[in-house]
Image (tube, coloured by chain):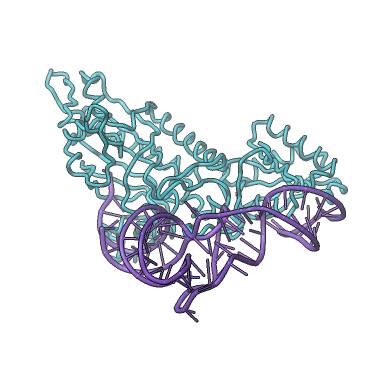
Amino acid sequence: MRFSRTFIPTLRETPAEAEAISHILMLRGGYVRQLASGLYIYLPLGWKVLNRINKIIKEEMDAIGAQEISMPVLHPAELWQETGRWFEIKEEMFRLKDRGNRDMCLGMTHEEIITWLASKEFRSYRDLPQVWYQLQTKMRDEARPKSGVLRTREFLMKDSYSFDRDDAGLEENYKKHTEAYHRLLQRCGLKFYQVESDPGMMGGRGAHEFMATSPAGEDRIVLCAQCGYAANTEFEKGIECPKCNTTLRVERAIEIGNIFKLGTKYSVPLKAFYLDESGKEKPIVMGSYGLGPARIAAAAIEQSHDKDGIIWARSIAPFDVEIIPLNIEDRDVLNLADTLYKDLKAAGIEVLIDDRDERPGIKFKDADLIGIPWQVIVGGRSLKEGFVEIKSRKTKQIERLHISDIKTGIFRILVEKDIFNH
RNA sequence: CGGGGCGUAGCGCAGCCUGGUAGCGCGCCUGCUUUGGGAGCAGGAUGCCGGAGGUUCAAAUCCUCUCGCCCCGACCA
């Protein structure tokens, strides 16, 4: 895309309302804008990042046989009354009435809805197992939204649900999800831990959280350097590792995903039953698996930035490469930059060209702020000597490439040196 | 929901204590000069001082109420 025609409103100064690093950089980099407390607008760059994360999530979910569907955000109250959560959950649920004065609510999660579907559709053990997922907006009237997109009142969630005939089936789907989460979070370039957690109001028989370490995190986890043991501090108050007696270290972390073995907590009240081989009616055994794409993006920034801005992993960066012609009034510079732009694009690389009529300093500053992993700098000075430069956002190292060798040179660097390349 | 802080130009802030013509920096617009790390000069535009009520000859400033945003805590299916 052309910078001059793309809406990327970078900010020179830090807005007063932002304190968390990811919040500051998302605002300054022109990724998001705040509408109200806990409500965010994703601008072109932010939306691109979110979609790249979503794409990775979908690929890994599809790979374990999950099928994408989409459920409503607006729910009838009855289902929530049947499971009791209509009464257990207090101000955190947005409630409203429709024109017929029927009680409705905005979905905080979708167990009730998907279990209703399951109760209508599944008859026989032959219908199972199934795993369904969606990327859908969740609404929660948070007591205290905070830290930019880390804790909001409306947010996107990947939520999947598994339906099995017995515990063995649930264990298998649970394990598949665990493995998919590890793969996808690695692909996003995150440092994270899987820890045991409290099933809480979700109920059921076991749960895990996926935690990305960051000082901006709301949770604390304990880690064992010796054996890799990790747990939520809710459970482990002691400072010794229960597995190998090494001293544990406590770190703050962002909860980016959680998974629950629901068992029959929802299938029983919502009458989601199936008939087994002997014709006996049994409740479906369920699991539910959440993941927050916006939290993945924010955690990635928290874990990878410097004083100049964001340092994206290439897998989730808004673009792979940013071409920076330093002076667009210099014909040679602009022409070469433009040719490169078209060539890289044609080769399937996501590329942004800073074709604005701005001074070099502004372009450098904005490029570092936005954090695209590779910068291709086309300047009059080195061009006269026959070179362009390719610079790593992460290491700041510059490699000079002769113009006769630019294209292949860039491809070589993208493949060989990109530590995030998968 | 408890505690604290802040609302003044697009952004960052000063002015408030001690009432008296609304300011600074950046950005924005015009022109010229500049072009390898947020340019220089000259000219210009921009304010319901969050809102309502009150005190006063006079309120950004004092008083009351209210709304919004941030931070700490509680909460977080």
In this picture, residue A276 sits left or right of residue A298: left
In the image, A95 versus A181, the foreground residue is A95
Q: Quadrant of the N terminus of chain A?
A: top right
- As drawn, the chain in cyan is A
The total of numbered circles placed on residues is 0
Q: Position of residue A333 (x, y in %)?
A: 82, 43
Query: Going 37% across and 50% down the picture, which residue do you hit?
Result: A255
Please determine whether, in this image, residue A331 is positioned above or below residue A272. Answer: below
Q: Position of residue A265 (x, y in %)?
A: 18, 36
Please determine whether, in this image, residue A101 is positioned above or below residue A189. Answer: above
Q: Position of residue A337 (x, y in %)?
A: 77, 40
Q: Position of residue A420 (x, y in %)?
A: 56, 45
In the image, A84 versus B26, the foreground residue is B26
Q: Is residue A3 visible?
A: yes
In this picture, residue B20 sits left or right of residue A361: left
In the image, A1 versus A58, the foreground residue is A1
Residue A408: quarter of image: top right
Q: Is residue A193 visible?
A: no
Please name the color used to draw chain B.
Answer: purple
Q: Quadrant of the C terminus of chain A?
A: top right
Query: Going 44% across and 41% down the picture, which residue do you hit?
Result: A293
